Image (cartoon, grey):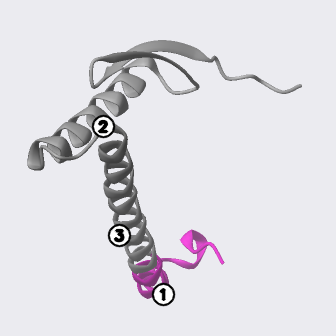
Amino acid sequence: MTTKKAVNVVKVSILGDEYSIRSDASPEQTRAVAEYVDKVIRQIMSGSQMVESHKAAILAALSITGELFEARDGAYALSGSMQKLSAEIKPWLPPAKRKD
């Protein structure tokens, strides 16, 4: 039997336009994401009065995706460091605690 996640429908506002977002995420998380997207788009638009909203949205998507890639790279690096540290510490553990 499979369990279905509850789908939440949340109304959010981005650049003054209202959107109904269907998501498995909590309503709070969906609102936070929408607020962040709105903030980034507004920052881009305030930096240059010549940017149209749809172009600002594309630039915001690129900016946010860049942040995501940097976070992923950081997570991969941290994971690698943790695995290396675990391998270094493993010999110090009693044999019963080592998970080989």
Q: Mark 1 points at which residue?
A: 91
What kind of residue is marked 2?
A: Ser
Residue 86 inside the magenta-drawn segment: yes
Provide the secondary structure element on which disc 3 rests: helix
Query: Quick check: 4 left or right of 63?
Result: right
Residue named by callout 2: 53
**Residue 66 picture quarter:** bottom left
Depth check, front residue: 78 or 26:
26
Which residue lies at the image location 44% right of the left edge and 84% below the top edge? Answer: 84
Q: What stretch is highlighted in magenta?
A: 83-100
Q: How crowded is mark 1: few (under 14 residues within 10 Å), some or many (20 or more)?
A: few
Q: Do the residues labelled 3 and 1 touch (CB within 8 Å)?
A: no
Depth check: 88 or 95 in front? 88
What predominant SS class does the magenta segment belong to?
helix
Q: Mark 3 points at which residue?
A: 74
Question: Would you place residue 59 above or below residue 35 in this image?
Answer: below
**Quadrant of the image containing the N terminus:** top right
Question: Of the residues tagged 2 and 1, which is closer to the observer?
Answer: 2
Q: Is mark 1 on a helix, strand or loop?
A: helix
* 3 vs 1, front mark: 3
Q: Which residue is drawn at 48% across and 87% down?
A: 91
Image x and y of residue 19, in percent: 44, 17
Question: Which badge, 2 or 1, comes first in the chain's sequence?
Answer: 2
Q: Give, as a three-letter code, the residue at label 1.
A: Pro
